[in-house]
Image (spheres, helix red, strand yellow):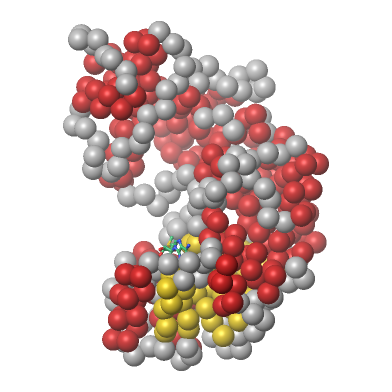
Amino acid sequence: MPSEPALEARFTALTRLLAEAQSLWRPLPFQHREVPWGERAPGLAEALMALSDDETDRLQASPFDASPLAAWLPVDALAEAVELPRLASDDTALPDAWGEGIGARKWRQIQAFAGCVAPDDAASLLEWCAGKGHLSRTLARRDGRPVTGLEWQASLCEAGQALAERQGQPVRLHRQDVMAEDAGDWLAPGRRVAALHACGDLHARLLELAAERGAAVTLSPCCYHRTEAVDYRALSARGRALMAEHGLTLSREDLAMAVQETVTAPQGVRRHRRRANAWRLGFDRLQREVRGRDEYLPVPSCAYGRLPDDFAGFCRWAADSKGVTLPDVVDWASFEAAGWQRQTEVERLELVRHLFRRPLEVWLVLDRAWRLVEAGQRVRLGTFCERELTPRNLLLETC
Ligand SMILES: C[S@@+](CC[C@H](N)C(=O)[O-])C[C@H]1O[C@@H](n2cnc3c(N)ncnc32)[C@H](O)[C@@H]1O
């Protein structure tokens, strides 16, 4: 288990690695016609373009294993900096019947997460942003103790309360906006707050209150970019000092990079995403020509199932949404082919950003851990399940 000095060394190492490579991982390749870091890493783009489809897929799944990028980038140092212990025991299985009404994947996540909450912990339990309180119900049932859940949406509180009562579990779901002034009243020493996949500002608020009030925390953070601040201000003083010392800056868009992964997406969704991306890139080529301006034009994303049936339909929709007038005659086939060709290039160029995704995520969790360390708490950092179950598998707990 990494001790706090080891975590601090990791925090420093990751800050340096991320800061030094900012010009490589920050630009979004699909926005640039030229390779944005061509001069900084000569030969890298050519090496990426030479990768087969299988090799590209393999590096998307395992970016640190036998990576040809190692000739240009600190692959081994990044791999070492993100290596974390598994905090849950392997045997976390609970009776299947307890998972009634919970999606199969969520149920497996809940079992793994519950495996990190000690059954004999003397602290009283509170769940943060509980939804229907699936985790609360599971912990109450496993440990035979009451659990309180906080959730903002009244309908979820009601549905979750009914579920708990039907199963005879001592769970109380309270309607509470955790961002409101009075949310801190729920936290006190002797209380442990469990939060599974609480988004950006919601989990930052929990950490702030736990630091102030001395409550214990078991947290798996999620969606770091769901935050009001456009520019990231580190939660910990150490994080702010490291950012200033190494010149690391992070925008809200950069934070989104930490959670953009498709490891758990089903094949159908991945195919759909590839087609949508290829069409966007084909439209990008078309709009540059039509507008006579060689610059990227952001197009809103199309919800799953809403993608028009063909490329021409997509371009008409995209042009309409951006106020671009398309000519009467367009060589659709050639622009679509250009989009698919560009897609194969972008996928390969994206491998550079991909290498820094997990390091950025681990850095963000270290910043959260450090907020608690600075408040005098002892922390542990690790994973609670395999990445295939959820890529958001990092867990921060105070002990
Ligand atoms: C990503 S879900 C996680 C739910 C649950 N922990 C799980 O893993 O399934 C986030 C939950 O936070 C709730 N939420 C959003 N904003 C909130 C707020 N300001 N106060 C309390 N709950 C909030 C949402 O309604 C939603 O149920």
On screen, residue 147 above or below 325: below
**98 or 326: which is nearer to us?**
326
> Residue at coordinates 47% horizontally, 44% vertically from top-left?
260
The answer to which quarter of the image holds residue 231 is: top right
In the rendered image, which quarter contains the C terminus? Answer: bottom right
Q: Is residue 114 left or right of residue 374?
A: left
Q: Is residue 52 visible?
A: no
Label tally = 0
Q: Is residue 341 left or right of residue 232?
A: left
> Residue at coordinates 59% horizontally, 62% vertically from top-left?
205
The answer to which quarter of the image holds residue 273 is: top left
In the rendered image, which quarter contains the N terminus? Answer: bottom right
**117 or 160: which is nearer to us?**
160
Q: Is residue 351 left or right of residue 238?
A: left
On screen, residue 340 above or below 79: above
Q: Most extreme residue toward the front, as rendered?
A: 181
The location of residue 66, given as percent across then percent down, is 58, 40
> Residue at coordinates 67% horizontally, 48% vertically from top-left?
233
The answer to which quarter of the image holds residue 206 is: bottom right
The location of residue 9, given as percent across then percent down, is 78, 54
**378 or 192: which is nearer to us?**
192
Ligand 1 visible in quadrant: bottom left
Q: Is residue 273 visible?
A: yes
The location of residue 87, given as percent across then percent down, is 59, 70
On screen, residue 370 above or below 101: above
> Residue at coordinates 77% horizontally, 71% vertically from top-left?
376
The location of residue 347, given as percent across then percent down, is 45, 31
